[in-house]
Image (cartoon, rainbow, N blue to C red):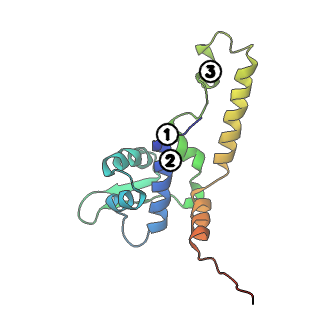
Amino acid sequence: MKLSTRARYGTRALLDIALQEGERPVLLRDVARRQGISLLYLEHIVAPLVIAGILRSTRGPKGGVWLIKNPTEIKLSTVIQLLEGSIGPVDCVDNPEVCSRSNVCVTRDLWDELKKAIEGTLGSITLQDLIEQQKKKEQPVSIMYYV
Protein backbone atom coordinates (compact mmCIF):
# COMPACT_ATOMS: atom_id res chain seq x y z
CA MET A 1 0.00 0.00 0.00
CA LYS A 2 1.31 3.43 -0.92
CA LEU A 3 0.24 6.88 0.14
CA SER A 4 -0.33 9.29 -2.70
CA THR A 5 1.66 12.45 -3.25
CA ARG A 6 -1.26 14.37 -1.71
CA ALA A 7 -0.61 12.77 1.67
CA ARG A 8 3.17 12.87 1.44
CA TYR A 9 3.41 16.42 0.15
CA GLY A 10 0.60 17.62 2.40
CA THR A 11 2.32 16.29 5.51
CA ARG A 12 5.64 17.84 4.47
CA ALA A 13 3.97 21.16 3.68
CA LEU A 14 2.12 21.21 7.00
CA LEU A 15 5.37 20.51 8.84
CA ASP A 16 7.12 23.24 6.83
CA ILE A 17 4.38 25.74 7.71
CA ALA A 18 4.59 24.80 11.39
CA LEU A 19 8.38 25.21 11.39
CA GLN A 20 8.22 28.60 9.64
CA GLU A 21 5.38 30.06 11.63
CA GLY A 22 6.12 33.30 13.35
CA GLU A 23 4.77 36.82 13.34
CA ARG A 24 3.29 36.69 9.85
CA PRO A 25 1.63 34.13 7.57
CA VAL A 26 3.79 31.69 5.61
CA LEU A 27 3.74 32.18 1.85
CA LEU A 28 2.71 29.06 -0.05
CA ARG A 29 5.15 29.88 -2.85
CA ASP A 30 7.96 29.68 -0.27
CA VAL A 31 6.70 26.34 1.01
CA ALA A 32 6.43 25.07 -2.58
CA ARG A 33 10.01 26.17 -3.30
CA ARG A 34 11.46 24.65 -0.11
CA GLN A 35 9.60 21.38 -0.57
CA GLY A 36 10.01 21.07 -4.34
CA ILE A 37 6.25 20.99 -4.93
CA SER A 38 4.33 22.76 -7.69
CA LEU A 39 2.57 25.82 -6.25
CA LEU A 40 -0.65 24.95 -8.07
CA TYR A 41 -0.59 21.40 -6.68
CA LEU A 42 0.23 22.70 -3.20
CA GLU A 43 -2.78 25.04 -3.32
CA HIS A 44 -5.02 22.02 -4.01
CA ILE A 45 -3.42 20.04 -1.21
CA VAL A 46 -3.78 22.85 1.34
CA ALA A 47 -7.46 23.47 0.56
CA PRO A 48 -8.83 20.51 2.60
CA LEU A 49 -6.62 21.52 5.54
CA VAL A 50 -8.11 25.03 5.42
CA ILE A 51 -11.67 23.70 5.14
CA ALA A 52 -11.05 21.35 8.10
CA GLY A 53 -9.85 24.25 10.27
CA ILE A 54 -6.24 23.14 10.59
CA LEU A 55 -4.92 26.05 8.54
CA ARG A 56 -6.17 29.53 7.81
CA SER A 57 -5.47 31.23 4.51
CA THR A 58 -5.44 34.91 3.57
CA ARG A 59 -4.90 36.42 0.14
CA GLY A 60 -3.16 39.65 -0.65
CA PRO A 61 0.22 41.27 -0.09
CA LYS A 62 0.34 40.24 3.55
CA GLY A 63 -1.40 36.95 2.91
CA GLY A 64 -0.34 33.38 3.37
CA VAL A 65 -1.24 30.42 5.56
CA TRP A 66 -0.80 29.66 9.23
CA LEU A 67 -1.83 27.03 11.73
CA ILE A 68 -5.10 27.59 13.55
CA LYS A 69 -4.71 24.62 15.89
CA ASN A 70 -1.85 23.93 18.21
CA PRO A 71 0.53 21.34 16.69
CA THR A 72 -0.08 19.09 19.72
CA GLU A 73 -3.75 18.87 18.66
CA ILE A 74 -3.11 17.87 15.04
CA LYS A 75 -2.88 14.10 14.67
CA LEU A 76 -1.37 12.65 11.53
CA SER A 77 -4.32 10.30 11.20
CA THR A 78 -6.58 13.34 10.72
CA VAL A 79 -4.23 14.92 8.16
CA ILE A 80 -3.87 11.72 6.14
CA GLN A 81 -7.61 11.06 6.18
CA LEU A 82 -8.32 14.61 4.98
CA LEU A 83 -5.84 14.26 2.12
CA GLU A 84 -6.26 10.59 1.21
CA GLY A 85 -9.69 9.58 2.36
CA SER A 86 -9.87 6.17 3.96
CA ILE A 87 -6.63 4.34 4.57
CA GLY A 88 -8.35 0.97 4.27
CA PRO A 89 -6.22 -1.15 1.91
CA VAL A 90 -9.31 -2.61 0.20
CA ASP A 91 -12.83 -1.28 -0.35
CA CYS A 92 -14.58 -4.01 1.64
CA VAL A 93 -12.94 -2.91 4.90
CA ASP A 94 -14.90 0.35 4.93
CA ASN A 95 -17.87 -0.89 2.97
CA PRO A 96 -18.59 -4.62 3.48
CA GLU A 97 -21.56 -4.42 1.11
CA VAL A 98 -19.23 -4.22 -1.91
CA CYS A 99 -18.36 -7.90 -1.53
CA SER A 100 -20.77 -10.77 -0.91
CA ARG A 101 -17.98 -12.70 0.88
CA SER A 102 -17.23 -9.99 3.46
CA ASN A 103 -18.79 -11.83 6.40
CA VAL A 104 -16.88 -15.08 5.71
CA CYS A 105 -13.63 -13.74 4.28
CA VAL A 106 -10.64 -14.17 6.56
CA THR A 107 -8.47 -11.95 4.37
CA ARG A 108 -10.89 -9.08 4.94
CA ASP A 109 -10.20 -9.50 8.66
CA LEU A 110 -6.48 -9.23 7.91
CA TRP A 111 -6.99 -6.02 5.89
CA ASP A 112 -9.13 -4.63 8.72
CA GLU A 113 -6.35 -5.33 11.24
CA LEU A 114 -3.86 -3.64 8.92
CA LYS A 115 -6.08 -0.56 8.72
CA LYS A 116 -6.39 -0.45 12.52
CA ALA A 117 -2.62 -0.73 12.93
CA ILE A 118 -2.01 2.13 10.51
CA GLU A 119 -4.68 4.27 12.18
CA GLY A 120 -3.15 3.50 15.57
CA THR A 121 0.31 4.54 14.47
CA LEU A 122 -0.83 7.70 12.70
CA GLY A 123 -3.20 8.53 15.56
CA SER A 124 -0.35 8.41 18.06
CA ILE A 125 1.77 10.98 16.20
CA THR A 126 1.06 14.69 16.28
CA LEU A 127 2.42 17.54 14.22
CA GLN A 128 4.33 18.58 17.34
CA ASP A 129 6.07 15.19 17.35
CA LEU A 130 7.19 15.78 13.76
CA ILE A 131 8.39 19.30 14.62
CA GLU A 132 10.53 17.94 17.45
CA GLN A 133 11.92 15.12 15.29
CA GLN A 134 12.75 17.55 12.49
CA LYS A 135 14.56 19.90 14.86
CA LYS A 136 16.64 16.98 16.16
CA LYS A 137 17.59 16.01 12.60
CA GLU A 138 18.69 19.56 11.88
CA GLN A 139 20.99 19.78 14.90
CA PRO A 140 24.64 19.51 13.94
CA VAL A 141 26.31 16.31 14.98
CA SER A 142 29.38 16.89 17.08
CA ILE A 143 32.35 14.75 16.16
CA MET A 144 34.90 13.80 18.76
CA TYR A 145 38.46 13.10 17.69
CA TYR A 146 40.66 10.93 19.83
CA VAL A 147 44.43 10.91 19.56
Amino acid type, label 3: Cys
Up-down: is 70 above or below 120?
A: below
Number of residues whose C-alpha sits closer than 10 Å to that of mark 1, classed few (under 14), some (14–19) or many (20 or more): few
**Mark identifier at residue 92:** 3
Local SS, label 3:
helix
Label 2, secondary structure: give it: helix
User: Distance from label 2 to label 1 (Cα)?
Assistant: 6 Å
Q: Identify the residue at horizontal 45%, vertical 43% (top origin).
A: 6
Q: Which residue is mark 2?
A: 8
What residue is disc 1 on? 4
Is residue 145 positioned above or below 126 on the image?
Answer: below
Relative placement, left or right, of 59 versus 22 is left
CB under 8 Å between discs 2 and 1? yes
Q: State left or right for residue 132 relative to residue 110.
A: left
Mark 2 Cα-neighbour bin, 10 Å: few <14, some 14–19, many ≥20:
some
Q: Quadrant of the N terminus?
A: top right
Residue at (70% x, 36% y) in the render:
116
Looking at the rendered image, the disc whose residue lies closer to the viewer, 3 or 2, is 2
**Can you say whether 122 is above or below 86 in the image?**
below
Hey, which residue is sitting farthest top in the picture? 100
Expressed as whole percent of the image width and height from the top left, the position of residue 9 reads 46, 49
Dot 3 or dot 2: first in sequence order is: 2
Percent coordinates x, y for residue 83 in the rendering: 48, 41
Q: Secondary structure at mark 1?
A: loop
Q: Name the residue rendered at 44%, 68% in the picture.
A: 20
**First in sequence: mark 3 vs mark 1:** 1
Q: Which quadrant of the figure has residue 94?
A: top right
Task: Kindly indicate whether the residue at mark 1 contacts the one at mark 3 (C-beta within 8 angstroms).
Answer: no
